[in-house]
């Protein structure tokens, strides 16, 4: 009998799903555009077994991958676990063998040295596979149609690092997968690598650098010829692991940085620009190059916005300081300064999970979307992390400075959106936005499809699931042509 501890990360709005299955043809409200062809993949953490000890992190759940295949006016649903080495070892044992989030000291001795990854952070079709990613381990390859797990991949020996970042960017000009990996040399290590894999799976660029202190290098961006790496003071040390406290703490005494270096170098040109007192809250929207200047657009807060990673000195989580504003950091590579040149406000609605039309990655762009927090609105559902806060979807025009939002109603919350271009050569922003809307009163989730440039109108289509999915992390769209290949 599986028995989960009575903790908010397993209850109410975060009740586990742990369901693999298929639905051939979802019930749909509204008119699904007949020309839409592709698949939306997303992933959420969903522990197969109860934790070895109470007090684990939401981020430690096994990856549960969902595929919504859209074709000929129909949407099918397929959901499978990402069957990591951890998942398989625990499945064979019938219980958890791996302990706390990113703490191998809490593992059963039988799994010493095994990859601890859960593949629960992001999924993306690349090099003919569905890649399922977690930043502490290699990248897991799954069949893009059946969702059967093939196993960890090193791209035929090209990718020798033990870790693979979970927020790769696809360079729209080359099709290369651009990514950073960190702490590949071991837990708490300061090593990091920027690399690019061609669509055929060959490593063509590799630049090594060291971060100013051990930190969670969760997201980054390409910006023209450059790569931009935000560093916020989420850090850790051996005493944390020895005492089995949450792997990351927030250390207010450390500066925040934006690192900038060339994509085609060896990493020795990395420059760290201090950006106090603001920090990138977690994820980047986009970045681009304008002459000698580099702009990074991201939700920004005064302290880190992840409440489950505690303050190093025990300060209580301050949700006001953690509120995010979409902002633009600018650094000038011509200046000798070691601080950012400016921080400009880009939007009003606080939020996270920023997205763009990915064909604009690393380029000057106009349209962005985030799920946002309208704190004035009521909430009728049960309590729980995220619920009742992530209640709106907002489109930001970062050129004109205008924004428009859709509120999902009092019963639910939203998951990260994803942009779908109308066609491969449609103008930027011309297409749809897809996002899961979870109803915490009925316990159903709907896959909602919006007109990307008119989200205020509300969903054009709701594909109705007979279950509620757990709050997910990230996902991506794969056009039909990629699925046929
Ligand atoms: C994040 C998510 C993670 C993780 C580290 O959103 C950072 C930030 C889902 O797992 O392991
Ligand atoms: Fe993320």
Image (spheres, rainbow, N blue to C red):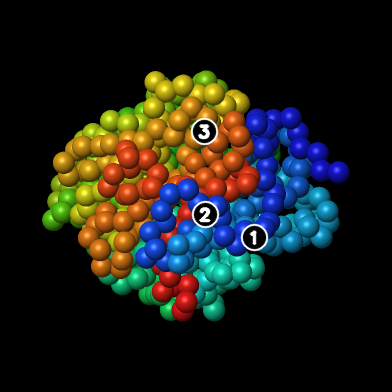
The residue lying at 52 percent from left, 30 percent from top is 411
**Between marks 2 and 3, how big is the CA–CA gap?**
19 Å
The residue lying at 56 percent from left, 31 percent from top is 385
* Secondary structure at numbered mark 2: strand
Q: Is residue 304 visible?
A: no
Residue on which the image places disc 2? 42
The residue lying at 72 percent from left, 45 percent from top is 99
Give the vertical position of 61 relative to 80 (above or below).
above
**Between marks 1 and 3, how big is the CA–CA gap?**
24 Å
Residue 241 location, quadrant: top right
Tell me: is circle 3 under 8 Å from ligand 1.
no
Residue on which the image places disc 1? 22
Image quarter in which the N terminus is found: top right
Q: Is residue 220 left or right of residue 80?
A: left
* Secondary structure at numbered mark 1: strand
Residue 258 location, quadrant: top left
Q: Nearer the viewer, residue 165 or 421?
A: 421
**Label 2: how many residues lie within 10 Å, few (<14), some (14-19) or many (20+)?**
many
**Residue 327, image x and y in percent?**
27, 37
Q: Nearer the viewer, residue 174 or 479?
A: 479
Q: Nearer the viewer, residue 128 or 229?
A: 128
Give the vertical position of 196 relative to 95 (above or below).
below
Numbered label attached to residue 70: none
**Label 3: how many residues lie within 10 Å, few (<14), some (14-19) or many (20+)?**
many
Pointer 1 with pointer 3, Cβ within 8 A: no
Q: Is residue 341 left or right of residue 422?
A: left
**Between marks 2 and 1, how big is the CA–CA gap?**
15 Å
Q: Earlier in the sequence, mark 2 or mark 3?
A: 2
**Residue 455, image x and y in percent?**
33, 42
Residue on which the image places disc 3? 412
Q: Nearer the viewer, mark 2 or mark 1?
A: 1
């Amino acid at each position: 009998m599986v028995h989960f501890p009575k903790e908010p990360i397993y209850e109410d709005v975060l009740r586990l799903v742990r369901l693999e299955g298929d639905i051939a043809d979802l019930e749909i409200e509204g008119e699904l555009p007949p020309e839409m062809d592709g698949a939306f993949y997303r992933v959420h953490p969903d522990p197969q077994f109860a934790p070895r000890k109470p007090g684990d992190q939401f981020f430690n759940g096994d990856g549960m991958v969902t595929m919504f295949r859209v074709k000929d006016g129909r949407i099918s649903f397929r959901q499978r676990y990402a069957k990591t080495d951890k998942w398989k070892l625990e499945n064979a044992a019938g219980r958890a063998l791996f302990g706390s989030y990113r703490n191998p000291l809490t593992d059963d001795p039988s799994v010493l040295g095994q990859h601890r990854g859960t593949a629960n952070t992001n999924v993306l079709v690349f090099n003919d596979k569905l890649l399922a990613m977690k930043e502490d381990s290699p990248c897991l390859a799954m069949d893009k149609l059946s969702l059967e797990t093939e196993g960890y991949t090193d791209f035929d020996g090209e990718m020798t690092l033990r870790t693979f970042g979970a927020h790769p960017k696809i360079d729209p000009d080359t099709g290369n997968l651009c990514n950073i990996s960190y702490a590949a040399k071991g837990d708490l290590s300061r090593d990091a690598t920027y690399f690019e894999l061609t669509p055929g799976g060959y490593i063509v660029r590799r630049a090594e650098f060291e971060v100013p202190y051990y930190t969670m290098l969760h997201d980054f961006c390409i910006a023209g010829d450059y790569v931009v790496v935000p560093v916020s003071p989420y850090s850790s040390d051996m005493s944390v692991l020895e005492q089995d406290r949450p792997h990351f703490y927030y250390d207010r005494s450390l500066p925040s940085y934006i690192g900038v270096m060339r994509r085609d170098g060896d990493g020795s040109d990395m420059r760290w620009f201090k950006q106090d007192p603001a920090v990138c809250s977690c994820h980047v929207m986009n970045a681009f190059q304008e002459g000698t200047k580099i702009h990074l657009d991201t939700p920004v807060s005064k302290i880190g916005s992840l409440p489950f990673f505690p303050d190093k000195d025990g300060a209580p989580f301050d949700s006001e300081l953690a509120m995010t504003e979409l902002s633009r950091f600018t650094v000038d590579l011509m200046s000798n300064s070691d601080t950012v040149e400016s921080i400009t406000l880009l939007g009003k609605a606080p939020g996270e999970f920023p997205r763009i039309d990915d064909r604009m990655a690393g380029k000057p762009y106009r349209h962005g979307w985030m799920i946002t927090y309208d704190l004035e609105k009521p909430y009728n559902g049960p309590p729980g992390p995220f619920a009742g806060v992530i209640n709106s979807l907002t489109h930001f025009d970062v050129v004109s400075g205008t924004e428009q939002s859709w509120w999902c109603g009092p019963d639910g919350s939203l998951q990260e959106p994803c942009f779908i271009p109308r066609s491969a050569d449609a103008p930027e922003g011309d297409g749809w936005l897809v996002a899961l809307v979870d109803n915490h009163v009925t316990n159903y989730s709907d896959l909602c499809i919006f007109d990307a440039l008119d989200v205020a109108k509300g969903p054009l289509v709701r594909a109705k699931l007979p279950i509620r999915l757990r709050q997910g992390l990230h996902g991506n769209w794969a056009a039909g042509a990629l699925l046929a290949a």
